[in-house]
Image (tube, helix red, strand yellow):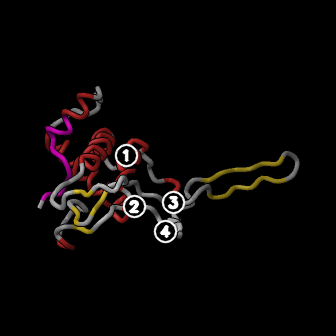
C-alpha cells in the first residue's frame, strides 16, 4: 500500500510550473516530505472527506474512497485519488521540505504569553490563544481541498415543501 499521495515527478512538475524554488533536494528528502504532508492532510482533513475508505480500515491513507462526491455532486471513482488531494499534498510537502516538522509542531498550551498594562493601574500576563489556534493554516491547501470537504454539522440544508 502506498504511504503518500502523488509522486516526486508530479511534485517536481507542479512546483516547476509555479516557480517554487524551495522544491529542491535529494529524492529521499522529497519522498519524506510527501509522506509527512500526506499524513498531515489525512489527520487535518480526513474526517471531513466524503465517503469511506475503499480498502477499509486497513487502508493506510484516506484516499481512495467509496461513495465520495465532490462539492458539485460529481462522483469520484472509488479507485482514484482526486487531483486536488495530490496538489494539496504538493503544497504541504513544500513546507515540510523547506522546514521539516513545520506542519505538526509540538505545542505547549499557555507557552505564549500576552501582557496587558493599564497605565497607573495594573499589569496582567496571561496565556494567549488555544493550542489549535497555534497550528499552521495553509490557505493554499484549504482552497485546493474545499470542494472535497463535507459540510459540518452546523450547516443546515433546508427542504422546501410544496
Between marks 3 and 1, how big is the CA–CA gap? 20 Å
Mark 2 or mark 1, which is nearer the start of the sequence?
A: 1
Mark 1 or mark 4, which is nearer the start of the sequence?
A: 1
Range shown magenta: 2-12
In the figure, is residue 84 to the left or right of 6?
right
Q: The residue tagged with tag 4: helix, strand or loop? A: loop
Residue at the disc numbered 3: 131
Mark 3 or mark 2, which is nearer the start of the sequence?
A: 3
Q: The residue tagged with tag 2: helix, strand or loop? A: loop
Q: With respect to residue 88, does 61 lie above or below?
A: below
Q: The residue tagged with tag 3: helix, strand or loop? A: helix
Cβ–Cβ below 8 Å for labels 3 and 1? no
Between marks 2 and 3, how big is the CA–CA gap? 24 Å
> Crowdedness of circle 2 by 10 Å Cα count: few (<14), some, many (20+)?
some
Q: Nearer the viewer, residue 46 or 39?
A: 46
Cβ–Cβ below 8 Å for labels 4 and 2? no
**Front label number (3 vs 4):** 4
Q: Nearer the viewer, residue 157 or 128?
A: 157
In the figure, is residue 101 to the left or right of 160?
left
Amino acid at each position: 500500500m502506498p504511504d503518500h499521495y502523488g509522486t516526486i515527478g508530479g511534485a517536481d512538475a507542479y512546483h516547476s510550473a509555479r516557480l517554487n524554488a524551495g522544491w529542491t533536494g535529494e529524492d529521499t528528502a522529497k519522498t519524506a516530505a510527501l509522506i509527512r504532508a500526506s499524513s498531515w492532510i489525512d489527520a487535518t482533513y480526513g474526517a471531513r472527506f466524503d465517503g469511506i475508505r475503499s480498502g477499509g480500515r486497513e487502508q493506510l491513507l484516506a484516499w481512495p474512497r467509496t461513495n465520495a462526491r465532490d462539492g458539485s455532486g460529481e462522483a469520484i471513482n472509488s479507485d482514484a485519488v482526486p487531483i486536488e488531494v495530490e496538489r494539496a499534498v504538493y503544497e504541504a510537502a513544500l513546507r515540510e521540505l523547506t522546514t521539516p516538522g513545520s506542519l505538526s509542531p509540538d505545542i505547549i498550551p499557555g507557552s505564549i504569553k500576552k501582557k496587558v498594562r493599564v497605565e497607573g493601574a495594573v499589569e496582567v500576563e496571561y496565556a494567549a490563544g488555544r493550542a489549535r489556534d497555534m497550528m499552521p493554516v495553509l490557505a493554499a491547501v484549504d482552497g485546493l481541498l474545499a470542494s472535497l470537504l463535507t459540510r459540518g454539522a452546523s450547516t443546515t440544508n433546508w427542504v422546501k415543501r410544496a
